[in-house]
Image (tube, coloured by chain):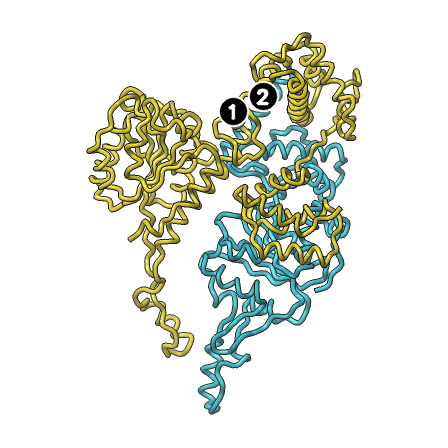
C-alpha cells in the first residue's frame, strides 16, 4: 500500500485543523524524495513524512501524534522496551525469569493471562459504580495476586548495580502491568451498560494538550524543561525587537590598530557597535493556594527569562509582593520548586491572595525605582478572596504599565464567577488568555508582539 | 554527490553506533543534496558523526567552529592587505587589487571551492549571532557566495554539509527551512551497551548492559548536568579496570555537580531499602 497525493493533501488539511501547518515547499521535498527513491511502502513513507517535514523538536512531537491519529500507525520510539535479564533471576523459582524472557521475546500471551486472572480473582467488580477506572486499579493493587506478582522482584540477593537494574525492571514492569489492567478494565466497563466516564480524566494523547494539573512527575519534568526554554525564547524575542542599527561612533583605537595592517593607511574605519537596550520587562506570578501546580510552571517561565537577562524583574505575590529576581538567579534548574517550598517566606499578611495590595506594591516599587518599564506580564487567576479591587488601582496600574499581558490558568468558563475579578483587569490588558497546558503557553509566548510594545 | 546508501554495519566498522532512524535521515540528506541539521544535548555524538562520515566516505573534512562574534572575515574570506600594499609599492600600473591571488580563503569559501569531495561541518551554530545565520542562508540554499569586489563564486556539487546545534538558542525558521532536521538524543540502552563493549576491554555483554541501564536510569533523574556518553564510558572503563563493583566510587568522573551527586546517592539508598524489604 502506498500513499497517494490526495491522501497526503487530506492529511495536510487534517493537520491544519489541528494547529499544525505543513509548508508547501516541505511537501515538495517529500514528494521529490518519494518519487526519486520510488518509495512504495506505507511505513517507510510515513517515516520520511515525519523526518522531512518538521524543523524543530516541538513540531516533530506534534506531527508524530498527528500521524498516529490519522493513519493509525505509530512511529517507533527510540526508548528501549526490553528488560535486562539478570543472572540472579534464574536462581530459585523460575517464574520471574519466565515472565521477563517472554516479554523480551514479544510474547505477551502469558502476561495477558496473568492480568486477566488478576482481575477475575479480585471477585465482584461492580462496573456500574460511578467511579473512575483508577479507583478499580487501586483496588486491584491491594489484592493478594498483584502483591505477590510484584514481590517476585524482591526475592533475590543482588549486588549494588544489579539492585538498581532490578528496581528499573520493577518500575517498568509495574507501569506495563497497570496500563494493561486499565486497558482490560476499560474494555470490560464499556461492555457494561452506562459505564461512567469522568470527562477530565479522559486520557490526552498529546503531552502539549495535557492539563498541567494532571501531569505525573515524569511528564512534568519534560514540560518544565520546555517551559524553561520558552522563558529563554520570550526574553530573547524581546531583545531581538529592540536591536537598532549596529553602527555607532568611531572606534578610534581599533581603527588605528587596523591601519597598522596596511602600513598606517586608513583603509577600514571601525565603528563602535551601538549598545543594545536591555529588555525592560516586569513579570509577576501569583503563587497563592488557588493557583496550585500552575504557579510552578509560572515560576519556571520566570526562571527561564531571568537567567537570560538581568534587566528582567521577576516578582511573586500572595498578599504582598516579593522580588525574587536575585533568589531565582542563585537557583539551579532543578531547584526551582524550592521557591514554593519556602512559601511562607512570601506571605505578608494572612496567606490569601490579595491583588489590590500586591499591585499597589508593584506600582510603588516601579515609581520608587523611577523605572521606565512599560511592559508587564501577569500570571494569576484574579481570585481576590472576596476583597474589593478599586477602579482607582486598576487605572493606576494602567498608567504605570501600558502594555499588560495576562495569563490566567483558570478555565475560561469559570472566569468572573465567585470571587474572580478578572473582568476588572481585562479592560486594561492587551491580551488575557487561558493558559492551562503547554500548547496554550507556547501560543501565548509566540503571540506576544513586542514590536508594538516599543514606540 | 552519488553515494550508495549507508547502513548500520558500515558505520559500526568505523566505531559509530547509530539507530536506523538516524541513518535513514543521513541517507535522505545526501540523496536530496540538502544540509543536515543535527540538534541535541552535548555529548551525544553529533560532531563525531561528521568525523565518522568523512572517514567512511573518504571525504575531506572542513570544519567551521562557531563562536560569539564570528563574522564574514573569519568565516568566509578576507583580502590580503599586506600583499596588496606590496604590489602597489612595486608600482605595477593597472594592477587589479581585487584578484583571486589576494584573497585569503576561510573555511566556508574553501569548502565551496575545493576540488575534492568534501564534508563541510558547521559546528555549534547556536553559538554564533543571528546575523551570521543570515550569512549562511545563501551558501546553504544557493550553494554560492557573493563577494562585492569580485563577483559570485559558485560552489562545487561534491559536498555534504552538516550543521550541529546544542539548542542553547532557537535557530531561525529561515535556516531550519533549508535543512533536513534530526534530533539526536542520548543513546538508548542497546546502543550504549554496544559502545561499552566496543570501547572497553574485557567487559561481557551482561555487565555492559547492566551499566548501560544504570546510566540511563541516572539520566532519567532530573539532574543539572546530564552525563554525556564519553563521561559514562570513562566511568565504566575505570570502574571495570579497577574491579570496583561499587556504584558509589569515582562519582566525579560521571556527575560533575554536587547536588547531582547527592541526588544520585539518595536514590541508591532508596533502591537498597526496597531490596531489603
10 Å neighbourhood of mark 2: few (<14), some, or many (≥20)? few
Q: Report which colour depicts chain A.
A: yellow
**Residue corresponding to mark 1:** A200
Residue nearest the viewer, comparing A143 with B195 = A143
Give the number of callouts: 2
Q: Report x, y in % for residue A171.
A: 64, 24
Kindly identify which chain the residue marked by label 1 belongs to.
A
Q: Quadrant of residue B234?
A: top right
- Dot 1: element: loop
> Which mark, residue B211?
none
Q: Quadrant of residue A352?
A: top left
> Which mark, residue B270?
2
Residue nearest the viewer, comparing A9 with A299 = A9
Would residue A94 be visible to someone looking at this image?
yes
Instruction: Give above or below for A328 relative to A118.
Output: below
Chain identity for the colour cyan used in the image: B
Instruction: List the single residue furthest toward the top.
Output: A123
- In the visual, does B208 lie left or right of B151? right
- Residue located at (33% from left, 67% from top): A253
Q: Report x, y in % for residue A169.
A: 68, 25
Residue nearest the viewer, comparing A327 with A349 = A349
Amino acid at each position: 500500500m502506498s500513499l497517494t497525493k490526495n491522501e497526503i493533501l487530506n492529511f495536510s488539511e487534517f493537520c491544519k485543523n489541528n494547529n499544525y501547518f505543513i509548508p508547501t515547499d516541505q511537501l515538495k521535498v517529500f514528494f521529490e524524495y518519494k518519487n526519486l527513491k520510488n518509495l512504495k511502502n506505507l511505513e517507510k513513507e510515513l517515516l520520511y513524512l515525519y523526518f522531512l517535514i518538521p524543523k524543530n523538536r516541538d513540531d516533530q512531537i506534534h506531527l508524530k501524534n498527528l500521524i498516529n491519529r490519522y493513519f493509525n500507525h505509530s512511529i517507533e520510539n527510540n526508548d528501549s522496551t526490553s528488560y535486562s535479564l539478570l543472572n540472579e533471576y534464574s536462581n530459585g523459582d523460575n517464574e520471574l525469569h519466565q515472565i521477563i524472557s517472554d516479554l523480551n521475546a514479544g510474547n505477551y500471551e502469558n502476561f495477558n493471562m496473568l492480568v486477566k486472572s488478576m482481575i477475575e480473582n479480585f471477585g465482584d467488580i461492580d462496573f456500574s459504580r460511578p467511579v473512575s477506572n483508577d479507583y478499580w486499579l487501586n483496588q486491584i493493587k491491594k489484592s493478594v495476586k498483584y502483591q505477590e506478582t510484584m514481590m517476585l522482584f524482591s526475592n533475590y540477593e543482588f549486588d549494588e548495580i544489579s539492585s538498581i537494574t532490578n528496581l528499573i525492571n520493577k518500575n517498568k514492569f509495574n507501569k506495563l502491568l497497570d496500563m494493561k489492567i486499565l486497558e482490560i478494565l476499560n474494555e470490560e466497563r464499556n461492555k457494561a451498560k452506562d459505564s461512567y466516564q469522568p470527562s477530565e480524566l479522559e486520557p490526552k494523547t498529546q503531552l502539549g494538550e495535557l492539563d498541567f494539573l494532571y501531569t505525573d512527575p515524569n511528564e512534568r519534568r519534560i514540560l518544565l524543561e520546555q517551559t524553561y526554554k520558552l522563558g529563554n525564547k520570550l526574553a530573547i524575542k524581546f531583545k531581538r525587537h529592540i536591536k537598532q542599527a549596529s553602527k555607532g561612533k568611531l572606534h578610534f583605537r581599533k581603527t588605528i590598530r587596523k591601519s597598522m595592517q596596511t602600513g598606517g593607511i586608513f583603509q577600514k574605519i571601525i565603528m563602535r557597535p551601538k549598545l543594545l537596550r536591555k529588555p525592560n520587562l516586569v513579570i509577576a506570578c501569583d503563587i497563592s493556594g488557588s493557583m496550585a501546580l500552575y504557579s510552578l510552571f509560572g515560576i519556571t517561565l520566570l526562571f527561564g527569562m531571568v537567567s537570560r537577562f538581568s534587566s528582567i524583574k521577576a516578582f511573586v505575590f500572595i498578599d504582598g509582593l516579593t522580588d525574587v529576581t536575585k533568589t531565582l538567579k542563585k537557583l539551579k534548574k532543578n531547584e526551582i520548586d524550592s521557591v514554593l517550598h519556602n512559601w511562607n517566606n512570601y506571605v505578608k499578611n494572612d496567606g490569601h491572595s490579595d491583588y489590590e495590595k500586591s499591585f499597589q506594591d508593584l506600582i510603588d516599587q516601579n515609581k520608587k525605582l523611577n523605572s521606565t518599564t512599560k511592559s508587564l506580564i501577569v500570571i494569576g487567576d484574579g481570585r481576590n478572596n472576596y476583597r474589593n479591587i478599586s477602579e482607582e488601582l486598576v487605572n493606576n496600574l494602567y498608567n504605570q504599565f501600558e502594555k499588560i499581558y495576562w495569563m490566567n490558568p483558570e478555565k475560561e468558563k469559570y472566569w468572573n464567577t465567585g470571587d474572580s475579578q478578572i473582568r476588572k483587569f481585562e479592560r486594561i490588558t492587551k491580551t488575557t488568555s487561558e493558559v492551562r497546558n503547554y500548547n496554550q503557553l507556547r501560543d501565548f509566548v509566540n503571540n506576544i508582539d513586542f514590536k508594538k510594545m516599543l514606540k | 554527490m552519488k553515494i550508495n546508501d549507508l547502513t548500520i554495519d558500515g558505520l559500526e566498522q568505523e566505531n559509530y553506533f547509530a539507530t536506523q532512524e538516524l541513518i535513514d535521515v543521513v541517507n535522505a540528506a545526501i540523496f536530496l543534496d540538502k544540509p543536515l541539521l543535527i540538534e541535541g544535548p552535548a555529548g551525544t555524538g553529533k560532531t563525531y558523526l561528521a568525523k565518522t562520515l568523512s572517514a567512511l566516505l573518504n571525504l575531506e573534512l572542513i570544519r567551521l567552529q562557531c563562536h560569539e562574534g564570528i563574522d564574514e572575515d573569519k568565516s568566509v574570506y578576507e583580502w590580503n592587505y599586506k600583499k596588496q600594499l606590496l604590489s602597489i609599492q612595486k608600482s605595477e600600473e593597472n594592477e587589479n587589487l581585487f584578484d583571486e591571488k589576494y584573497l585569503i580563503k576561510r573555511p566556508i569559501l574553501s569548502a565551496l571551492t575545493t576540488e575534492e569531495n568534501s564534508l563541510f561541518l558547521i559546528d555549534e551554530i547556536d553559538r554564533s549571532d543571528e546575523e551570521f545565520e543570515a550569512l549562511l542562508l545563501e551558501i546553504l540554499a544557493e550553494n554560492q557566495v557573493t563577494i562585492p569586489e569580485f563577483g559570485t563564486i559558485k560552489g562545487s556539487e561534491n559536498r555534504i554539509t552538516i550543521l550541529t546545534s546544542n539548542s542553547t538558542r532557537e535557530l531561525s525558521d529561515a535556516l531550519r527551512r533549508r535543512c533536513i532536521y534530526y534530533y539526536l538524543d542520548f543513546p538508548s540502552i542497546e546502543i550504549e551497551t554496544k559502545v561499552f563493549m566496543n570501547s572497553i576491554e574485557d567487559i561481557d555483554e551482561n555487565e555492559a548492559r547492566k551499566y548501560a541501564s544504570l546510566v540511563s536510569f541516572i539520566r532519567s533523574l532530573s539532574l543539572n548536568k546530564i552525563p554525556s556518553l564519553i563521561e559514562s564510558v570513562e566511568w565504566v572503563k575505570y570502574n571495570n579496570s579497577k574491579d570496583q563493583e561499587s556504584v558509589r566510587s569515582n562519582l566525579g568522573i560521571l556527575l560533575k555537580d554536587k547536588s547531582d551527586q547527592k541526588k544520585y546517592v539518595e536514590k541508591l539508598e532508596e533502591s537498597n531499602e526496597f531490596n531489603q524489604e
